[in-house]
Image (cartoon, rainbow, N blue to C red):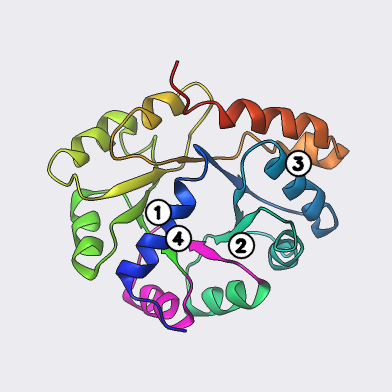
Amino acid sequence: MTLSPKEASARTREICAIAPIVPVLVVHDAGKARALAEALVAGGLPALEVTLRTPAALDAISAMAEVGGGYVGAGTLITPDDVRAAKAAGATFGVSPGATDALLAACEAEGLPLLPGAATASEAMRLLARGYDMLKFFPAEASGGAPALKAIGAPLPQISFCPTGGISPENAPAYLSLPNVLCAGGSWVAPHDLVAKGDWEGIEALAQKAARLGAPS
């Protein structure tokens, strides 16, 4: 089933609105993937991004896709082959650090909703012209942080963002307070030491705290 850019953005917008934080996961052991996903979903973070940076990533996506209540996406999509592999593994959405015509076309052809990356107004405008209005702002902190994203939002209020890259519990509220931010991507909710130990209660507790970041004080 093909997917238009407008349809893709509508779907990624729905996913980004579920919770304030999308865990960005680098999974080295697919055997721990299901338990990791269960802990994050139980903690209130059901939208998960598994980056395609390890040999275990695709198997991890397949395992996580079986967890009820979760929405598992594939991150670091670079090539059309990445898109096809992610879709075959069970990913329900994709995330990319940037955007190329080939990558966008592959996601549209495969029916994989994409959250394409942009770091400048020109990149965001180019994606908007194609029909994408829900984007990833990356690398967020290196690109000027929340002040830069606020500035981009002034002339481009029709675009919403999920900032990732250097997001922490300390700076996430500044991003989440912006009208053009629906959620933020962060890796701190699944630290490698807790995953390695199988401390799922600890990860669930981190997820619970992260899930409250967007709540009014």
Q: Amino acid at mark 3?
A: Ala
Out of 17 and 99, give the one closest to the viewer: 17
The crowd level at tag 1 (other Cα within 10 Å; few <14, some 14-19, many 20+) is many
Mark positioned earlier in the residue sequence (3 or 4): 3
From the image, state whether disc 3 or disc 2 is nearer to you: 3
The crowd level at tag 3 (other Cα within 10 Å; few <14, some 14-19, many 20+) is many
Instruction: Name the residue: 74% across, 34% down.
Output: 203
Q: Is residue 115 visible?
A: no
Out of 130 and 16, give the one closest to the viewer: 16
The crowd level at tag 4 (other Cα within 10 Å; few <14, some 14-19, many 20+) is many
Q: Which mark is residue 39?
A: 3
Percent position (x, y) of residue 106?
Answer: 43, 80
Mark positioned earlier in the residue sequence (3 or 2): 3
The alpha-carbon separation of the residues under discs 3 and 1 comes to 23 Å
The alpha-carbon separation of the residues under discs 4 and 1 comes to 15 Å
Percent position (x, y) of residue 190?
Answer: 69, 38
Mark positioned earlier in the residue sequence (1 or 2): 1
